[in-house]
Structures are given as C-alpha cells and as structure tokens.
Amino acid sequence: MEDQLHWEVIYEIVDPSADFFPGDDWHLKRYLESEKNLTSSFFQSEFERLRNMNDRPQERGRQFDYFMGLLFHQLEGTKVSVKDSTRTGEVDVYVSARRSPDWLTGLIGQGTILENKWQQNSVQVGEVDNFHTKAQDLAFPCYIAYFVSINGFSKGGTGALAKVQACDDPRLVDFTEDDVIEMVDHGTPKTKLQERELV
C-alpha cells in the first residue's frame, strides 16, 4: 500500500460506482486540475521510487504510464487520460491539447499519445509498428506521437530506432531514460518537446 500513497490523490473516478482500488480493473483514468504545477522534486522522488521497483516489473510498468501521464499533465492547457482505448488497441497516455498554447498545438496538433516501456529489453520493431498504427488511427489531427523506452530501442539499419525515425504521418519521436530524467529535472516535458521538434 505504501507505493500507492502518492497516486491516491491524483485521479478522478470515471465510474462513480467503482471501488477506489478495484484490483486490476482500473477505473481511475483522468488527472485532476489540482495536480498541475507539481514540483520537480516530486517527480524526482517518484522516478527514483519507480527505479527501485526491480522486484515488481509489471507493477512498475503500469505505474510508469501514470507517471508519464502526470508529467505531461504539467503542460499548460492539457487534459490527460491514461489507458484509453482506440479501434486499434489501448493507448498508454492520451494528451488533449485543444485548449493549449499555440506553441504546443502547433507542435503536436489537437493532441498526442504516448507509448511507455520500462522493460528489461530494448524496444523492437514490431512494438514500433503497433504504436504507429494506433497513432494513425486517432480521430483528430496529430502531428507527433511519443514512444518512451527507459531501456532504449534496438539499433541498426533495420532496428526499432531506425523505424521510429522513419515513421511519418504522424511522426514518431523516441525518448529514452536520459530524456525522461531531463523532463523530471524540469518538472515538465516542455523543454524536451521543443528541443526535439526539429530532430
């Protein structure tokens, strides 16, 4: 229960009839407006806590989705939900930017999605293909989608990193552990998103 203390206060219950912690069937998806403007020290301590969950990789992976969602929730004007579904499968994090400043909507469109991986091995080509299919299926203009992998992407001419960099409409941007640490240190992904805009 101690691992969940920080997470209990940051979601609204989509289904009011649901138990607060209903086993694996989570109904807690959207972040509250009061969870904007969190400090970088909050994100640093939470990231360190996730890093120390080596004995529970599946739970860490699930909590990492919520962590990245909360980090993107710090962007002005965004509405973020976690574990939403599309026609082509579940989306780890969905970010609506319809009420965001021009710099963000000009960069990503009306919204974007994130795929988050904290697994032992690097991401492979098939995982990139699956995510790009989800990004192409969105029912709103999306210019860029983000693939976050703590342990990187397989390399080489036919590897996952080359595949990410070749994807278009929408474009995919890869983030690794170093990128996440920079976002955490700033308490927002804003600087990193702007830095990777033209890369």
Image (cartoon, rainbow, N blue to C red):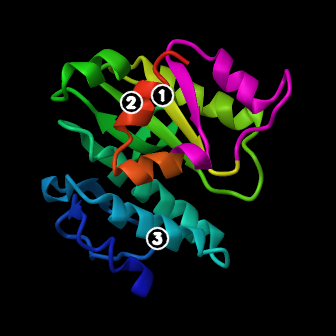
Which residue is pictured at 23% across the width and 71% down the height?
9
CA distance for labels 2 and 1: 5 Å
Label located before the other in sequence (2 or 1):
2
Location of the C terminus by quadrant is top right
Other-residue count near label 2 (Cα within 10 Å), few / some / many at <14 / 14–19 / ≥20: many
Foreground of the two, 194 or 27: 194
Identity, as a three-letter code, of the amino acid under mark 1? Ala
As helix, strand or loop, the secondary structure at mark 1 comes to strand
Identity, as a three-letter code, of the amino acid under mark 2? Thr
Residue at mark 2? 112
Residue at mark 1? 145
Residue at mark 3? 24
CA distance for labels 3 and 2: 26 Å
Mark 2 touches mark 1? (CB < 8 Å): yes
Q: Which mark is residue 180?
A: none
As helix, strand or loop, the secondary structure at mark 3 comes to loop
Which residue is pictured at 59% across the width and 75% down the height?
52
Identity, as a three-letter code, of the amino acid under mark 3? Asp
Label located before the other in sequence (3 or 2):
3
137 is higher (above) or lower (below) than 150: above
Task: Find residue 1 and report its image quarter.
Answer: bottom left
Foreground of the two, 134 or 147: 147
User: Residue 68, how many percent across, how many down?
Assistant: 43, 51
User: Which residue occupies the extreme top position in the image?
Assistant: 169
User: Residue 106, how many percent across, how many down?
Assistant: 30, 15
Which residue is pictured at 51% across the width and 12% down the height?
169
Left or right? Give the position of 139 relative to 164. left
Q: Identify the magenta region.
A: 152-179
